[in-house]
Image (cartoon, rainbow, N blue to C red):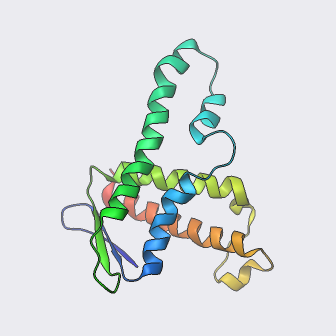
């Protein structure tokens, strides 16, 4: 998979295999798999109790989080691909915050489930030592998501 800025100020994703599409699909799967209370409710719990919060702010956060994941899911599933599973997705400047938010939800879920930030920096997957396959997979996805967000920040978001 390749990610690169476009001349129009967006970001292009070139997926070359079925595995690449699976990684992209994992963004939404990870974002939606937080056990227990949804992420927006967890964030709301950290806010000072204010009657206006639940009435005016919380519904917008719920809607925004859900809309971000839905948008990314639709963009991935609607992307054209050839018989060898190669295809591209173009993220415009306007869509970039939505993608960034969905990816952030996925990263926060992985952090909650696997405490990835507790791992020391690694250069190679062998540096991770003895961890479960599920955690190893989560580390790889989290690293990809972080790189994806960095590209969005560097080339697309202002």
Note whether residue 99 is visible: yes
Determine whether 70 is above or below 144 in the image. above
Q: Residue furthest front?
A: 83
Q: Nearer the viewer, residue 80 or 95?
A: 80
Which residue occupies 66% across, 56% down? 111
Percent x, y of residue 124:
65, 84
Which residue occupies 52% across, 70% down? 144
Percent x, y of residue 7:
19, 67
Q: Residue furthest top?
A: 51
Q: Is residue 21 left or right of residue 104?
A: left
Question: How many numbered marks have been drawn onto this rendered protein structure?
Answer: 0
Q: Quadrant of residue 37?
A: top right
Which residue occupies 64% across, 21% down? 48
Q: Is residue 129 left or right of residue 122?
A: right
Q: Is residue 135 left or right of residue 91?
A: right
Q: Give the quarter of the figure containing the N terminus.
A: bottom left
Which residue occupies 48% across, 72% down? 22
Note whether residue 46 is visible: no
Q: Residue furthest left?
A: 8
Determine whether 88 is above or below 28 in the image. below
Percent x, y of residue 95:
30, 51
Percent x, y of residue 120:
73, 70
């Amino acid at each position: 998979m390749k990610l690169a800025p476009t001349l129009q100020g967006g970001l292009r994703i070139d997926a070359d295999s079925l595995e690449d599409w699976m990684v992209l699909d994992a963004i939404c799967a990870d974002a939606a798999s937080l056990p227990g209370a949804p992420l927006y409710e967890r964030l709301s719990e950290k806010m000072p109790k204010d009657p206006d919060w639940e009435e005016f702010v919380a519904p917008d956060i719920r809607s925004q989080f859900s809309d971000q994941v839905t948008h990314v899911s639709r963009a991935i599933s609607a992307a054209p691909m050839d018989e060898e599973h190669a295809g591209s997705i173009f993220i415009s400047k306007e869509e970039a915050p939505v993608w960034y938010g969905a990816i952030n939800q996925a990263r926060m879920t992985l952090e909650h489930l696997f405490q990835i930030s507790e791992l020391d920096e690694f250069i190679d997957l062998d540096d991770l030592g003895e961890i479960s396959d599920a955690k190893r997979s989560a580390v790889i996805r989290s690293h990809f998501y972080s790189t994806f967000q960095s590209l969005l920040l560097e080339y697309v978001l202002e």
